[in-house]
Image (cartoon, rainbow, N blue to C red):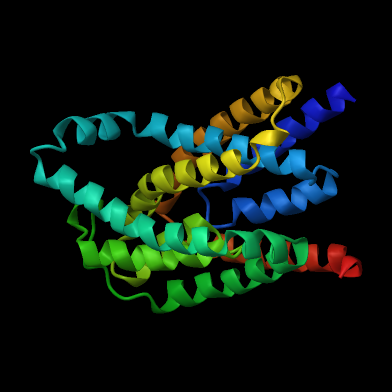
């Protein structure tokens, strides 16, 4: 049984790390994968929280120089101050709505069927945005102003619905509001840091009674797997967006959503 738990932890760690920063919904993938692996009980939910922390630390490591530069110069450098203000404004909408509706979201929306529909609708949204997105007026993340940040924050709030994708909402939202693909992607990575740290802390505090030292090995495997998988995914996505659009992710979402609907329809 212990070996089976470690195997499940390894698989879910890969799923989390590989999908967290892609526009395909890591939460949706974890809900479906957890259901398939019969690892969707209370302990499974806490495990998902822990491995999300592993994924976000991968971004911190990838951007450690930029983070260190911003932290050391925030008191006097206007560019660093603007980035911190933008992150704060973009963080607020999802944080406030998440606190207000956390119970309703986790109670009524966390199911494979709702995720499947969100995947499909999000896929068509990607096609629409790629077709009708306005011309780029902000080619780099440093050129963002507070209005860009607040709009992206409102777009990110859509990802409170499981299956929408936080990364997808912020990246594609940024493109809708005039950011280049690269600028929107980088801002999405930075915005993930406060958002995911806050969400992880909140969920861990709410579920601390389910934490046990006996599960340390399982958590460690999932955490490290998610960290390295996310590190690979972040590097790969940055290379990808330099030369490609997001239509491949739209097809992936639609096909996966249809397959999930077919598989889980009998549980409705």
In the picture shown, does residue 29 fall above or below 215?
below
In the picture shown, does residue 187 fall above or below 259?
above
In the picture shown, does residue 16 fall above or below 93?
above
Left/right of residue 87 with respect to residue 43 in the rendered view: left
- Which sits in the foreground, 146 or 11? 146
Left/right of residue 67 with respect to residue 229 in the rendered view: left
Q: Among all residues in the image, which is located at the extreme left?
A: 76
Residue 64 x/y as whole percent: 33, 29
Q: Residue at x 14, y 46 (%)?
A: 79
Q: Is residue 151 visible?
A: yes
Q: Residue at x 34, y 58 (%)?
A: 90
In the picture, residue 111 is in which quadrant?
A: bottom right
Q: Residue at x 40, y 79 (%)?
A: 132
In the picture, residue 210 is in which quadrant?
A: top right
In the picture shown, does residue 141 fall above or below 176?
above
Left/right of residue 236 with respect to residue 3 in the rendered view: left
């Amino acid at each position: 049984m212990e070996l089976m738990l470690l195997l499940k932890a390894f698989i879910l760690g890969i799923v989390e790390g590989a999908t967290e920063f892609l526009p395909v919904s890591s939460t949706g993938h974890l809900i479906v994968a957890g259901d398939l692996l019969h690892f969707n009980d209370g302990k499974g939910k806490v495990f998902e929280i822990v491995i999300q922390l592993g994924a976000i630390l991968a971004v911190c490591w990838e951007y450690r120089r930029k983070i260190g530069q911003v932290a050391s110069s925030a008191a006097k450098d206007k560019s660093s101050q603007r980035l911190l203000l933008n992150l704060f404004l973009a963080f607020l909408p999802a944080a406030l709505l998440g606190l207000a509706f956390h119970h309703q979201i986790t109670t009524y929306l966390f199911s494979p069927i709702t995720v499947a529909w969100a995947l499909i609708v999000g896929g068509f949204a990607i096609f629409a945005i790629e077709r009708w997105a306005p011309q780029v007026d902000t080619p780099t993340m440093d050129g963002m102003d507070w209005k860009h940040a607040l709009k992206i924050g409102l777009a990110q709030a859509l990802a409170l619905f499981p299956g929408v994708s936080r990364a997808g909402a912020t990246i594609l939202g940024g493109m809708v509001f005039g950011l280049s693909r690269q600028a929107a992607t980088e801002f999405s990575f930075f915005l993930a840091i406060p958002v995911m740290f806050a969400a992880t802390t909140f969920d861990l505090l709410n579920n601390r009674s389910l934490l046990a030292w006996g599960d340390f090995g399982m958590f460690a495997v999932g955490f490290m797997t998610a960290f390295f998988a996310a590190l690979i995914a972040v590097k790969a996505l940055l290379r990808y967006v330099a030369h490609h659009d997001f239509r491949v992710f739209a097809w992936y979402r639609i096909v996966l959503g249809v397959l999930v609907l077919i598989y889980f329809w009998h549980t409705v």
